[in-house]
Image (tube, rainbow, N blue to C red):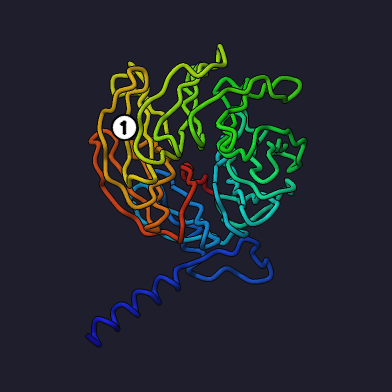
Amino acid sequence: MNKLRAIILTSVLLLLAAPVLAACGDETHEPTAAQVAVQTQSTPQGRILTANQASNTVSLIDVATDTAYGTVATGSQPHHVLGTPDGKEFWVTLYGENRLQLFDPVSLKEVASVDVGAPNDDLNFSPDGTRLYVSLGTTNALAVVDVSNRKLLQTIPVGKTPHGVRVTPDGKYVVVTNTVDNTVSVLSLGSETKVVATIPTGQDPFEVVVSPDSKTAYVSNFLGASISIVDLTTNKTTGYIKSGKQPAMMSTVPSADGSSDNLWVANTGAAEVWLIDAPSRKLITRIPAGQGSHGTAVTPSGKLYITNTNDNNVTVIDMAGQKVVATIPVGQSPNGLTYMPAPAAP
């Protein structure tokens, strides 16, 4: 028993000693050897970053080996993390603060922050990377941020307790889920950003993804065990797809033959991921994940990563084989996550 306890204690101490890079690094001190090792880690297939809300960190996962090799300290309660379209920065939303954080993907240090006036939830960039749209759940608004100038441009009222945010691939609209109103707001992104439609969905619309042709939005109804199908050409909900219990984040991926869109759905209350053929609305398969399966991110190498909020880990699925290939420990209460390509050499 004493030997077992010693092994457990040693494991805990090693975990606590894992390299952590400060969010605002002290430039007067040289980085430690462990920090340099994290900064220079080779990730030829890119990285997955997870926002660990209860740890105030972002975990770094090497896609090639499916190992977590370091963490980055953040502000209070990081909720979602997203890389810029050009891969030169990653941004973090904070539930516990009124600001966003920006990090350099090479040094892994905070380079700036933007005050958006309220705790912030989800975020999405315009296709050209010039604008960032952020949901402010406590103030029923959407923040519009000038990315290059690190500046809040405007705050636009939407429905009650907005959460999910997604810009259409053509860059013409942004769709925001209003969790309390059971609606989505559609905002035009022309010369003026404004609400042009409010569309009923299912119960507690949580997250949203948009088809590659920008014509259809899929909205996960967290308390409705369904996915709303929203026609963005008519601004109407045209149908529903059955999901698992408490569907949360989703990813759209072309089918193997390219004939349709597959929808990968993390079902928080079912501890599993559903693969759905979106056009036919048919379930293809169900794959076990961890407890509180929540966030999804896809890599060019054909993997799907799912954060398991209650288990403090990430499930890795080989999408072609439709099977789990790894489980990776990360920080506490991992929520949103993002894929980033390998950083360019200095």
Q: Is residue 106 left or right of residue 136?
A: left
The residue under the point 61% across, 57% down is 109
How many labels sit on residues? 1
Front-lying residue, 243 or 56: 243
Front-lying residue, 87 or 80: 80
Q: Is residue 198 above or below residue 293?
A: above
- Identity of the residue furthest to the top in this view: 234
Front-lying residue, 156 or 325: 156
Front-lying residue, 121 or 171: 121
- Quadrant for residue 155, please give it: top right
- Identity of the residue furthest to the bottom in this view: 2
The residue under the point 60% across, 34% down is 125
The residue under the point 47% across, 42% down is 341
Q: Is residue 233 left or right of residue 42?
A: right
In the rendering, at what x and y percent does residue 86 appear? 57, 36
Q: Is residue 298 above or below residue 33?
A: above
Q: Is residue 309 above or below residue 322?
A: below
Please name the amino acid that badge 1 sits on: Leu
Dot 1 alpha-carbon crowd within 10 angstroms: few under 14, some 14 to 19, many 20 or more: many
The residue under the point 38% across, 56% down is 313
In the rendering, at what x and y percent does residue 18 appear? 44, 68
Disc 1 secondary structure class? strand
Q: Is residue 283 above or below residue 30?
A: above
Which part of the image, by quadrant, shows the N terminus? bottom left
Camera sees residue 127: no
- Quadrant for residue 267, please give it: top left
In the rendering, at what x and y percent does residue 211 appear? 46, 22
Camera sees residue 11: yes
Q: Is residue 251 left or right of residue 287?
A: right
In the rendering, at what x and y percent does residue 296 appear? 42, 41
According to the image, label 1 marks what residue?
275
